[in-house]
Amino acid sequence: MQNRNQNQTQQHSNQNNHNNQNNQSKIRSSIIKKIVLFVIVLFGIFGIISSFGSDDYVDENIVLLALDDRPANTFVPEKTAKVSGGVNINTMPEELMEEISPKDEGFDSELIEKIGDFLKNKGYGELNEADEAFGHDGEVDAFVISADMLFFGGLVSSRNVEPNIDKEERIKKGTNILKELKEIYPDAEVYVYSSIQRLAPTFAGDVDDDLYNDIRYWAINYDRVHNEGKVEYTANLERLENRIPDGILKGYINSREMNQRINLKLLELLDDDYIDYMVISQDDAADYGLHRVEQKEIEEKKSSLNIEDKIEIFPGTDEVDGILISRYINKAYDREPLFYPIYPEVPEIIKDNIDPEYYDPEEWIPLLEDIPLEKNIEARINALGGELVDDREKADILLFVNNLNCGCGEMTEDLVKRLKRQIELDEDEKIEVRDELTESIKEFAREISYNLNMGRYAAVSDVGKLNGGCKTFVEGLLEEVELFDLLSYSGWNTAGNSLGQSLAQANNRHFYILAGSEDIEYEDRYYLDNDSKLLGARAQASLIFHRFSKDYLYAGGFRKEVIDYMGELEDNDGDQHDLGEDYDKIKDYFDDKFRGELEEFYEDYFDGRRLALGDSGDCDCCEGFCSLGLDEGDQPGYVLKSLSKLEINLPWRRLFEVDITPEFVIEREG
């Protein structure tokens, strides 16, 4: 009885335990179902947000086949892309670029296949550190390709006098690569840029400068006599033909014909949609020359194929990669930025005594170019996907173009000198003219400052002087503005080079500011993550420092010091284009003297300065967004804490340009 009662008690206890277990199981099951349901809902919402974010967060991969290995075609376009924040650039491996670099024996056409392997092999092969930081998986969104690199191994090699090059094989290999590329990456944009050969050629080995000049003037006089009917130049033409070796002249003509055949073939690829957009740039030119006939032939074929909206033609070359990178950014994010150009006021004494072709943007043709400045600006804005407007209040970006100078350096279009040749001036009047020019340029810097303080976006292109910024103008900027408040500055080489670089950087910085703006909403907005914001700030700081250091400090002063130093070296022949055996001494001089100037420049104008992260959203001066968050509290920003690294190099062992690569410690405010 006791056992039965114990058994009943045990069974009852077991039943209770079983019931408790069932109840607990049901409770657990209910909780799990609720958790699962919550997770499903959460992931559904997250999926929507994630999908939305993946479209709206900037994350682009561009493969660049650069024109050559100079900083203008590597460092500058890479930084220009990164200024936008979420755009990454991948370039050829260094070892391949070194193999391709210009050599006395010329470009081996078999290297075209190696370039093709680089382009076709998933764009660029292994991911670099920047890719890994972004989480890129090897997808390619766009290609920016130099045809001069693809077909010749670079700009210099494209001008080589090579009478026996394998024309047909090169053209076939290069065009097949472009066709295959579009077939492998049908969704990627393919942008190509090519050049019309400059007047002077390139030779393998050492050649007397007189031969360069003779060929240049032969091309000019040939055009005058045979295409323009200017028979008065016949004697000049015949004299030059007698001086130039027959084989050299044939090689020069052969080289130009090769370039032209490639350009015409590229137009066909553009028409067949293997290329999505193209720029043909005119390398250094003049009012007359063989390039004019080549341009006409290209224009006629462009019209016959009806591809006017897919191509732009303008003078310049080195800056085109940055323009095409900006074009892709604008296309990918459905942007069409509006630009309005502003020029300095021309003093009355200049207007009264100088022909407008020497200063008026509608008429002035800058050195080494063949179209007026105003047309040059419009062509570049079209190429990057923007629009030139005639109302400054409608503009997103004000483009300040300094087309004056006041005798601020070598190789200038000096209006004062032109003035002297046309009217008689006493010494006091000469001083007055120079003072008026100087004041006009300084007033232009003050106008830029005023517009910045109004919240306007400002890009600056300094084109009055060939191969360097105007010292008076830059010193005015240093007095009047914080350099980081500018979207861009450029004053290097030709007017077209300067304009293209300034416009491309300004476009991408403007893109960054709108994408980086916090707590501001607008239609079709896009975003940058924190890593991209920091990357863009670093790139902007590097480019601004690079440009002012190179275009102002180096071109405006230190290069002259180096030339003077070369004159003190024993047995130095003064050749600025080949430093020869004295390269190490000259490089040491740079490291000793120029580094100190750069470090002082950083301390004076960059240390502790602030890079605005976004737009303040407070704009009452014009239409649209234009109010850069300059003041603390408007928008977060980044502050330069120190110059952590500074590399100085002389590309191609010459003085024409200097490679200045800075690295900064940058911290976000707050």
Image: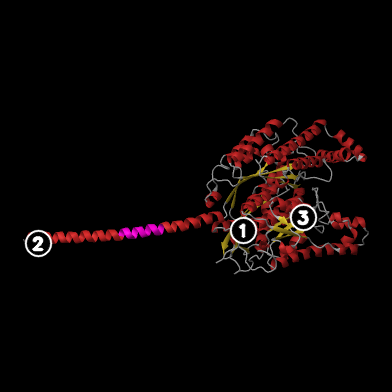
Q: Quadrant of residue 396?
A: bottom right
| Dot 1 amino acid type | Tyr
**Looking at the picture, does residue 305 appear above or below residue 402?**
above
Q: Position of residue 388 (x, y in %)?
A: 73, 56
Q: Give the alpha-carbon distance from disc 2 to disc 1, as whole Å.
A: 83 Å
In the rendered image, which residue does mark 2 sit on?
A: 5
- 406 or 51: which is nearer to us? 51
Residue stretch in magenta: 28-39
Alpha carbon distance from label 1 to label 3: 26 Å
> x and y percent of residue 252 in the render?
78, 35
Q: Mark 1 — residue?
A: 512
Near-viewer residue (340 or 438): 340
Amino acid at pointer 3: Val
Residue 611 or 390: which is nearer the viewer? 390
- The answer to which of marks 3 and 2 sits earlier in the sequence is 2
Up the image or down, 618 lies above or below 459; here it is below
Residue 463: numbered disc: 3
Q: Is residue 35 located in the magenta-colored stretch of the structure? A: yes
Three-letter residue code for mark 2 = Asn
Q: How many other residues sit within 10 Å of disc 3, few (<14), some (14-19) or many (≥20)?
A: many
Residue density around tag 2, few if under 14, some if 14–19, many if 20 or more, within 10 Å: few
Figure quadrant of the N terminus: bottom left
Secondary structure of the residue carrying tag 1 is helix
- Which mark is nearer the camera, 2 or 1? 2
The location of residue 275, given as percent across then percent down, is 66, 42
